[in-house]
Amino acid sequence: MAKADHIKRLVASFGKNQEFRAATLRIIDEAAHQGKKPFAESLRKILDANVRPDYQSQGKQPGLTALASHIDATRDLLEEIPALRGLKDIVLNSDTRALIENVIEERRRSEELRRHRLPVSTRLLFCGPPGCGKTLCAEVLAHELSMPLFSARLDVIISSFLGETASNLRRLFEFASRTPCILFLDEFDALARTRSDNSEHNELRRVVNSLLIMIEKFRGPGLVVAATNLAQFLDEALWRRFDDVLSFELPNIREIDTLMDRQFANFHASFEPSSMGGKLVGLSYADIERICVDAIKKAVLKKRKSVSETEFAAALRHEARRKALISRRSA
Ligand SMILES: Nc1ncnc2c1ncn2[C@@H]1O[C@H](COP(=O)(O)OP(=O)(O)OP(=O)(O)O)[C@@H](O)[C@H]1O
Ligand SMILES: [Mg+2]
């Protein structure tokens, strides 16, 4: 049974969309913790179907105005990314999966941790090469935690007037400290280059210093997730400011097999998808996904029910040409 306090809070939140959701989520957390998983899951489904988070509603539910005005004040600095994919849609190595599951569990049971005066992880740094799931994982977190995902628009935030960059960052962090959301700072290296970089002047060092402080002080209600594929350029002092650093690497053969099985889960292949693993080592998840989609598209356009090995080989060659072209252009 839900605790009397939770029921009182639920009734008191009548008409206030955001608070009603939060109160129901507390009851769901409690039920899950007590091992009443079927009840927790069915309540969660009912909640998601009937009471959408304010940011997803069309302005018809009460409580929207307050959040909307927060978003308005920072709208120019943020872009909302729809969070449709969940944990089942991402392939992760076991260490990273364990860390992500831990973040989700902590957040879902944050009340319990706070009751014991324990901190909840609120600041994560994602590192790794392109196309290995950093942005996808931010989406997964938002989806699993039913929070909106807001990506910071660096093109607007980084101003040629450095004083303005710091004040834009402050606005962002103020927004994230009021709004339960995932604040995603992609290409974080562009903001947080090492302070000892001689080519930069003092003003830029001050921006990095204030960023350090903002991250250090950030306590939620949501999460700040920073991502970079140039971790070597990050200021050393930054690493310590994050509660966890998660690594997203190129897939190994086992992870490739899992990805391939998923790619061909809804469209048949006339070969064993995992038999292609050897040819795909060294490619990113995004590359492999592109090859599979390319091969499936060819089969669909030929009005066939399955992808042949020849079509898959053609898609592989297509990707190799694409990569060669890109590397020639960036050389
Ligand atoms: N680990 C993964 N599991 C399943 N699919 C993945 C994974 N990584 C990437 N993908 C697929 O590739 C797409 C692009 O990946 P994503 O944008 O997450 O890469 P990234 O690490 O953020 O790259 P970048 O450094 O270029 O921003 C994803 O939307 C997803 O479809
Ligand atoms: Mg990304």
Image (cartoon, grey):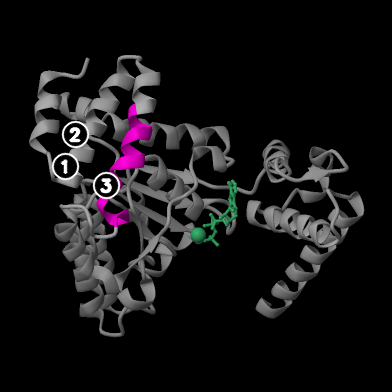
User: Of label 1 and label 3, which has the lower sequence position?
Assistant: 1
Say whether mark 2 is within 8 Å of ligand 1.
no
Along the horizontal axis of the image, is 264 left or right of 216?
A: right
Confirm or deny contact between disc 1 and disc 3 (CB under 8 A). Answer: no
Amino acid type shown at disc 2: Ala
Q: Position of residue 243 (x, y in %)?
A: 32, 42
Q: Residue placed at 55% from the left, 32% from the top?
A: 94
Q: CA distance from mark 2 to mark 1?
A: 6 Å
Say few, some or many: other residues with alpha carbon within 10 Å of mark 2 (under 14 / 14 to 19 / 20 or more). Answer: some
Amino acid type shown at disc 3: Gly
Residue 206 visible to the viewer: no
Residue for badge 2: 23
Q: Residue placed at 38% from the left, 77% from the top?
A: 155
Along the horizontal axis of the image, is 59 left or right of 43?
A: left
Region of the chain picked out in magenta, as a range:
43-57
Is 316 above or below relative to 163? above
Q: CA distance from mark 2 to mark 3?
A: 16 Å
Q: Is residue 109 magenta?
A: no
Q: CA distance from mark 1 to mark 3?
A: 15 Å
Residue for badge 1: 19
Element type at mark 3: loop
User: Of label 2 and label 3, which has the lower sequence position?
Assistant: 2
Residue 176 visible to the viewer: yes
Residue for badge 3: 222
